[in-house]
Structure formats: C-alpha cells, structure tokens
Amino acid sequence: LDSVTIGNGIEHIEEWAFGKLSDSYFEDLIATIEGAMDSVDIDGIDDLIEGWKELIADIIDDIHPLTSVTCMAAVPPVLGGSAFAASYDWAKLTVPQESLSQYKNADEWKKFLFIKADDPNDVNGDGEVNIADVNCIISAIHDDGTASPRLDANHDGEVNIADINAIIDQILSSEAQSHQ
C-alpha cells in the first residue's frame, strides 16, 4: 500500500488503521524472543530462534511507509493513536484547501511533515493542473459515464464537459498570469 484516499464522509479512523510498525519495534521483538529463549534448553532451539529472526527480517524488508495520504473530509477525522505510524515523516498529506489550517493544528494530523492543500482541478493527482487532467475526464466520460468523485472538478455532482471547462479555465488563467 503506497497511498490512501479517505473520503469526505469519514469522521473517525481507528488506532493503527494505516500504521506500519517500525524497524525498532521488530528489533525489540527479536531481543525479547532471544531473552525468553536464553533460559530454555531444548534441542534445536537455536535453529528456531534463527528461523524467527529470518522471518522478522523479511517482514522488516517489506515495511514501506505510505508515500501519499489524501483526506477529502472538510473537518479532519479524529485519528486513533498511531493511525499513520511510520508514515508521518514520509507521506505527503493532501487535504481540502479550505481545511488546511485545521489539519495542521489537529492532533495526530499535525504529525505529518508534508501537508498541502488539494487543488480540486488536479483530478489525476499528479500535483499539476494541465491537459492530463482534461484527458482523465474525457476518458471517464468516454468509457461509461461513471467516474470517481475526484473527477468532478467543479463539484456539481456530475462528471461532464463542465469539469473540462473548469480545468481549461484554470490552465488559461495560470498561463495569463505567468505572461504578465
């Protein structure tokens, strides 16, 4: 799991929901297992411990923090402790523009080092508003008419030509400002 998008109807996220255990957690676990096994005198115990160490090492290798979290809720959901553990320092948190300061001040959410406001016209989520966003909407309309709410650039509840126009207007406005 590299990225998570949380819808606007979410009010609470449980403890450790997207948290990933850190390397130090597993190192402590290995030390605890070794300490508990030191007093045990069973044939093959050393092989058992080595097997556990290899298994835990494989798990550690598979731990990758999230790289992006998008939360579309206008009011920051209440987060249980360590809801995004191991990702606070790595993931880019994208939130509604009007709620940016609320997230920056909310318990747990403020632990994210990278918090930015969402641009509703960046429908493909690449951090830029350009023709690629227009193409995403055209593809969605062409495919079957059903699309992700993220593609509703003008927030009227429908994905249609009006969303394309909203994006084109922003692109043209940005270009006009850069030529002044």
Image (cartoon, grey):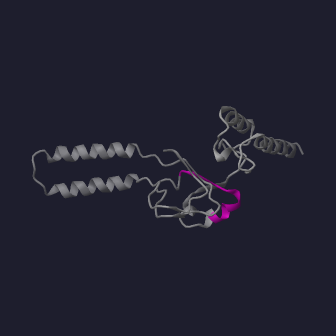
- The residue located at (79%, 45%) in the rendering is 166
Q: Establish if 154 lies above or below 139.
A: below
Q: Residue 34: image x %, image y %?
A: 22, 54
State the extent of the magenta-drawn residues as a range: 90-102
Q: Residue 18: image x %, image y %?
A: 47, 54
- Give the quarter of the figure containing the C terminus: top right
Could you tell whether 158 is left or right of 7 in the image? right
Could you tell whether 175 is left or right of 119 in the image? right
Is 90 in front, or is 79? 79
Q: Is residue 97 magenta?
A: yes
Is 50 in front, or is 115? 115
Q: Residue 119: image x %, image y %?
A: 71, 50
For the view shown, which residue lies furthest in the right direction? Answer: 180
- The residue located at (26%, 57%) in the rendering is 32
- The residue located at (19%, 45%) in the rendering is 48
Is 169 in front, or is 88? 169
Q: Residue 93: image x %, image y %?
A: 59, 54
Q: Is residue 142 magenta?
A: no
Query: How many tags in the picture?
Result: 0
- The residue located at (53%, 51%) in the rendering is 90
